[in-house]
Amino acid sequence: MLPRMFVILKHIFVRFSRHIQIGKSLDQVCANTLVLFPRMPNCLCCGICALVAFKAQKPVSENTDTLQDRIHHLALMSE
């Protein structure tokens, strides 16, 4: 039973090796990556946080106006 579990885990790691990392910092991995035993300097984690971390994609901002566009729009509104 135990060797079969290792074979299954090996297939999972081989298949998703780009999205599963071991012992890396979240700054060093790409988005949508599961990190086992994450390295977090200056942070004492306990429980599941010390074992697993996930780096998600950054949400795309719906508001693409720049600060300069907003200032220009406010200036036009005040006239």
Image (tube, grey):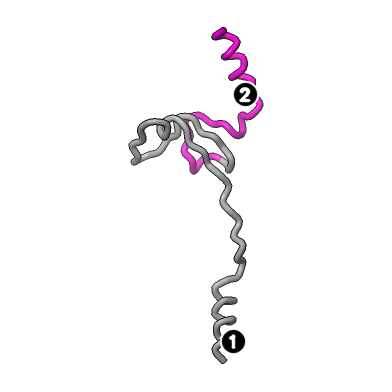
Say which residue appears at 55% left-offset and 82% top-offset.
Answer: 74
Q: Nearer the viewer, residue 41 or 73?
A: 73
- Name the amino acid, label 2: Ile
- Name the amino acid, label 1: Leu
Q: Residue 68: give x, y in percent of width and height.
A: 56, 76
The kind of secondary structure element at disc 2 is: helix
The residue pinned by badge 2 equals 12
Res 40 → quadrant: top left
From what the image shows, is residue 59 above or below residue 13?
A: below
Give the side of residue 43 with respect to residue 65, left or right.
left
Give the side of residue 3 with respect to residue 52, left or right.
right
Magenta part of the chain: 1-29
Q: Disc 2 versus disc 1: distance between alpha carbons?
A: 57 Å
Q: How many marks?
A: 2
Q: Residue 20: give x, y in percent of width and height.
A: 57, 31
Say which residue appears at 59% left-offset and 87% top-offset.
Answer: 76
Q: Residue 6: give x, y in percent of width and height.
A: 57, 14
Give me the disc on residue 76.
Answer: 1
Q: Nearer the viewer, residue 25 or 78?
A: 78
